[in-house]
Structures are given as C-alpha cells and as structure tokens.
Amino acid sequence: MVVTGKNECSAGMVAPSSSASSSTTSNSLRRVCRICQSGSGRLVRPCHCSGTMADVHEQCLYAWIVASRNDQRCEICQRLYAFDGTRLLPVWKWSQPTFTSRTVVEWLLIAALVYVCWYMLTLLDERCTLDRLVVNALPIRSSDVARIAVLTVVAACLGLSLCSQLFKVVDYVARQTMRRYIDAEHHCIEPPSMGKTITV
C-alpha cells in the first residue's frame, strides 16, 4: 500500500510537468512575423536570423525595405536576402509617380516640337515640295532646303525627347515590382532518411 501511494504521488507530480513542457514547446514552435507579430499567412525566412526574428511576411518585409531603402541585406544579421525572381505589384499598390517642374517643362517642350513638326509638314505640303522634287524632278530651292533641314532637326529632337520619357515610364514600371522571397539555405535541412526538405 505504501509503494502504491508513492507511485500515485509520483505520477501526479510528473503529469503537470509534462503538460507544462508541451505547452512551452508549443509556444516556442509557434511562428509569427517579426514585424507585424501575426502568425497568419505565408511566412518566410529569407535571411540567417533565428528564433522569433526568423519569420516574416513578404508584404511586411517589402514595406520595411521600402522604408529603409535597403533591399539587399538584413539589418540584423547582415546577410543577403534569399529570393527567387520578382513579381509585378497590383496596380492599386503602385507608388504615386512624382511630377516636378522639370517634368512639366519637358512635356511642354515635346508639345512645342510636335507643333513645329506639324507646321513644317503643312508648309511643305502647301508649297508642293514633294511633287516638285519627286514627281516632277525639278531642282530644289533654297527655301526647300531650309524647311527640310528644320524639319529634320526638330523631328530628331522630338524623337530623343519621346525616348527619354519612354525610358522614364519603363523605369517607373520596373520599380513597381516586389521580390519573391524564399527560405534561405541556412534554414533548410535535408534529412538523410527522407527526401523532403524541412524548414527549421
């Protein structure tokens, strides 16, 4: 009877300890974003940080990177972020384009160049320049040379200006992308007896 009592007492003491241990383990294994502290959604470990600083949402990390202007290295472990390509953000999440006084002047210049080109083409048509030079093969006049030269220079300037604006638009769209972050190799272990990769 004495032995049985000891066993029952011993069993009663071990059970709470085991329950507390499993509760602690469960809390330690719970993954939460280190920025928003939420455990919902897809979490990645793109750097070498461990523990509670390892997991992060892609959107949270992107917002942090935009604010800190450092899209290469983690500010904590100083390791490069692991990513696999980029993806275009939804249009409603694009950053607002900036319009400066220089931008306004550039577009006014383009409008002026378009008007000059249209005016010179109108003059050439009114003077029947193409008919005289191409169809009738008449000698070219000095006024024709001046008009054609002005039209060529203005058209070249217009083309360069439009190309410059096109490059700016392409650059703006390229900045509306977000890297597709993945787990860093540091957090991936390949067990010898299993063919699956386990994230730790």
Image (spheres, rainbow, N blue to C red):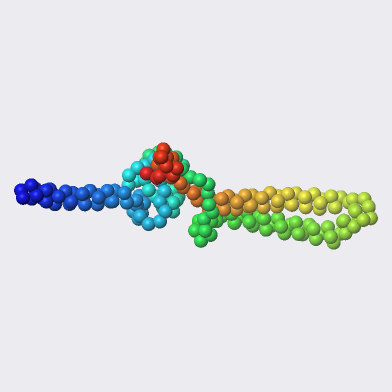
Q: Residue at x 71, y 57 (%)?
A: 114
Q: Residue at x 67, y 58 (%)?
A: 111
Q: Residue at x 57, y 53 (%)?
A: 173
Quarter of the image that includes the C terminus: top left
In percent of width and height, residue 41 lies at: 40, 56
**Viewer-closest of 48 and 116:** 48
- Residue 164, compared with residue 115, is above or below; it is above
In percent of width and height, residue 53 lies at: 34, 46
In percent of width and height, residue 75 lies at: 39, 42
Tally of numbered tags: 0
**Viewer-closest of 95 and 20:** 20
**Viewer-closest of 115 and 22:** 22
In percent of width and height, residue 51 lies at: 32, 44
Q: Residue at x 50, y 51 (%)?
A: 178
> Can residue 11 be seen in this snapshot?
yes
Question: Outermost residue toward the left?
Answer: 2
- Residue 189, compared with residue 153, is above or below; it is above
**Viewer-closest of 171 and 186:** 186
> Can residue 184 be seen in this snapshot?
no
